[in-house]
Image (spheres, coloured by chain):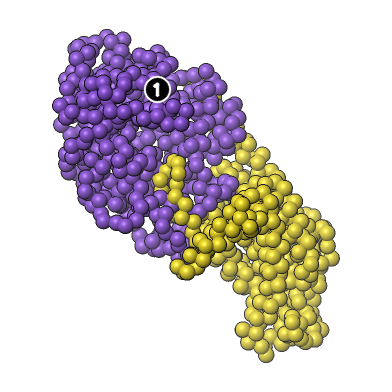
Chain colours: A purple, B yellow
Amino acid sequence: MANVIKLKRGLDIPLQGQPEARIIEAAACEYYALVPDDFHGIVPKVLVKPGEPVSIGTPLMCDKNNPALQFVSPVSGEVYAVTRGERRKVLDITVKSDGKMTQAPAVAYKADMTPDEVRDSMLANGLFTFIHQRPYDVIADASVTPRDIFVTAWDSAPLAPDFDFVVKGREDDLQAGIDALRKLTSGNVYIGLRNGAVPSVKGANVVLFDGPHPAGNVGVQIQHIAPINKGEVVWTLNAFDLLIIGRFFNKGVLDFTRLVALTGSEVKAPCYVRTTLGARIDSIIGDNLIDADYNRRYISGNVLTGTRVSAHDYLRAPHSQVTVIPEGDDCHEMLGWALPGVNKYSTSRSFFSWLRGKRRYRFDARLHGGERSIIMSGEYDKVLPMDILSEFLIKAVIAFDIDKMENLGIYEVAPEDFALCEFVDTSKLPIQSIIRDGLDRLQKEMN
Amino acid sequence: MKTLRNYIDKIKPNFMPGGKLAMFRSVFEGFETFLFVPATTSRSGVHIHDNIDSKRTMTIVILALMPALLFGMYNVGYQHYLAVGQLSTVGFWTIFFFGFLAVLPKIIVSYLVGLGIEFTVAQWRGHEIQEGFLVSGMLIPMIVPVDTPLWMIAVATAFAVIFAKEVFGGTGMNIFNVALVTRAFLFFAYPSKMSGDDVFVRTTDTFGLGAGRVVDTFSGATPLGQVATHTGDDMVLTNIVGQPLSLLDYAVGLIPGSIGETSLIAILIGAVILLWTGMASWRVMLSVFAGGLAMAWVANTFASPTYAGSLLSPLTHICLGGFAFAAVFMATDPVTGARTKIGQYIYGFLIGVIAILIRIYNTGYPEGAMLAVLLMNVFAPLIDYFVVEANIKRRLKRAVKA
């Protein structure tokens, strides 16, 4: 039997709005978009012009530094617009769907591919874009053979979709995905599952994890399975994306539909919605929101690592979740820091909400305080189950002391691992973006 | 509340850059965020945040100081009326009110001076006002003798806030605990007002209250003061009118001493608040007591009449003087203490050991808790350095093995 790794440190934030195990079909959606910002570490080069007809799998853009890495259209139709921002930065490429979902004819697929063929077909069909690498947490460099590949099949983030539910009926896609990954590494393919999930995969090392978030984060799992040392490269991906890769190698079709968990306290009936990557957020939400006359925050992804979007933006590529919470910018709470605060969630017991036991809270997006220097000690360590001295690493990153960063384990971490640190931080520091900037600068310095 | 909010929104533009009163922007923002929790929402990273912020943290610490402060006020009155022999004729509230009147000016002076400097510096640097001094400003009056002149407190507070905190970059950047620097400044600059037999009990009236003639048997020496001047083998510590004291008296704290430090019980109530809310490190607190008990036990085992302090039991040592206060409120200052878990055990333990070491074997100083914490403030980064190095070595070893 697979071994179970029990983690103690971490935190499951009790948010309202957990998804029920119920699937609805998303309303028909006219526009879909590809957002280059979702793919960290690439320089987008647009390959299409507005008006051009596209099919599922037609390349819309590629990485300027590595043209083999292509980003494809998730639907068929025609290119509607290429939106650019300041300094002509590509913000998104929008495709107007014809609703027919025709496949591009040039989809390169055959059974029993060699490792090189697997890699090349993934690159050409936009499937490689789901694979990240550590160090640096960027889209993986396909020219490097990774030491190991780590798949996490457990999203432990607040209100996250349940992989057991999503994978139901698609076990053979998962298996086909694992088989494909096996060909890409000379090392092992590890799959991290929630303890209690029923693993039914062959050819991968199954590791079960138990504990609060971030136990499902791939970075945390790697540290407890086979930590990354300086000079090593591993690839990581999550199993929700692996299903899309697996479907391709199983059935030979490109199918970017996914089950998205619609969650959050503003959602009337949180559930799962079947939609396609890049779909508009409002097509996913439909009329499933409670009535309100205040501002709301729409998040593609979860409340910790997701991207803030508006209702007419798009479901971003890395996400299988949409969260809607109140913005809270209209709340001016008088002397709030002095009141007992029986309704205020805190991991410390400094608010009297601990008197009311365990319950779920309706969070809004307020910071609840001003930014300060780091004052409290040990706060971050309580929610980071890794052998990383988080506070010292963060300080090293702020000072950009490369030696220290390397020594303290910068190659093992990704911004998402620090999301909970940012949540609990009394000093309200933007820790994820500190780590992100640090990784980017380091990568530039090293290459 | 709505009217107040509207008024603030109305006057706000005056304080923004370019406004008429832009030079008071930090002060304005300080008051605005004091009145209303800022409605700023997150722009990057996580979308939700824990409710705790640095204002709440400091509020809880001040709350935890309240039992010791209120008891200290009562004790100031108690010692006074005991000294003038009127204890049986005045009621509880008179006693408390006397102490209240004696202590309140010190609190006001400490806050006025400290916050004045903080506000000025914040405005000068264009910062938000930081909350750190709210705690320091409450600690300062609690760790001085009741007869410390107000101007000395003002000078010492100004010195500490400027040279121990602001020159390093403000709250969160200081190396030394600000309140203890204030205390150390007073101790070394005005030794006659900080120790001896005449400063810990107020024998004169306060604003006309409690006038009377001191009884004949009066001696204002604190128990540790008596230990410091004691010679010979058998030692009996007494209160200010010559009655012998028991361990229970030390723990309750109706004995002369600095305002907030005498009652172990009141301090422990504060400790429970700090630990339950998670505002202080139990590792530091526990290991200070462990270190103090260990050192006092060693000294007591090899007791010698040369060092009268070694004649006291370990439990007596942690009840007396500023030891418990330092353990609960000073050593646990996260900014100036060790920040790694293992480091916190070492840091706390050494504070305990050094405090008792100074107290017993350095007869020049009757009390060592303050100096011990200040000394370990210096070593805290070094302790952390070794813990961090150990983590680095572990990582390198792993790489070599792989």
Q: Decide if residue B390 is on the left or right side of residue B49.
A: right
Percent of width and height locating residue A377: 55, 47
Picture quadrant of residue B305:
bottom right
Question: Which element carries disc 1, helix, strand or loop?
Answer: strand
Residue A430 seen from this side: yes
Name the residue at 31% across, 47% down: A324
**Can residue B314 be seen?**
no
- Nearest the camera: A296 or A406? A296
Q: Is residue A112 placed above or below A344 in the rendered structure? A: above
Would you call the spot at circle 1 few (<14 residues within 10 Å), some (14-19), or many (20 or more)? many
Nearer the observer, B80 or B170: B170
Residue A70 in which image quadrant: top left
User: Which residue is more in the foreground, A344 or B258?
Assistant: A344
Vertical arrangement, residue B394 with respect to residue A336, above or below: above
Q: Viewed as shown, does residue B85 lie left or right of A102?
A: right
Please report the residue visible at 46 percent of the width from the left and 31 percent of the height from the top.
A86
Could you tell me residue A135's position as x and y percent? 46, 25
**Residue B69 vertical position relative to residue A350 in the rendered view, above or below:** below
Q: What subunit carries mark 1?
A: A
Outermost residue toward the bottom? Answer: B89
Q: Residue furthest front?
A: A51
> In the drawing, does residue A311 fall left or right of residue B292?
left
Three-letter residue code for mark 1 = Pro
Q: Residue B388: x percent and y percent?
A: 58, 35
Residue position marked by numbered label 1 in the rendering: A44
Labels in figure, total: 1
Q: Name the residue: 17% across, 26% down.
A: A101
- Residue A360 is situated, as x and y percent measured from the top left of the image, at 32, 55
What residue lies at 69% left-to-right and 61% top-to-bottom? Answer: B116
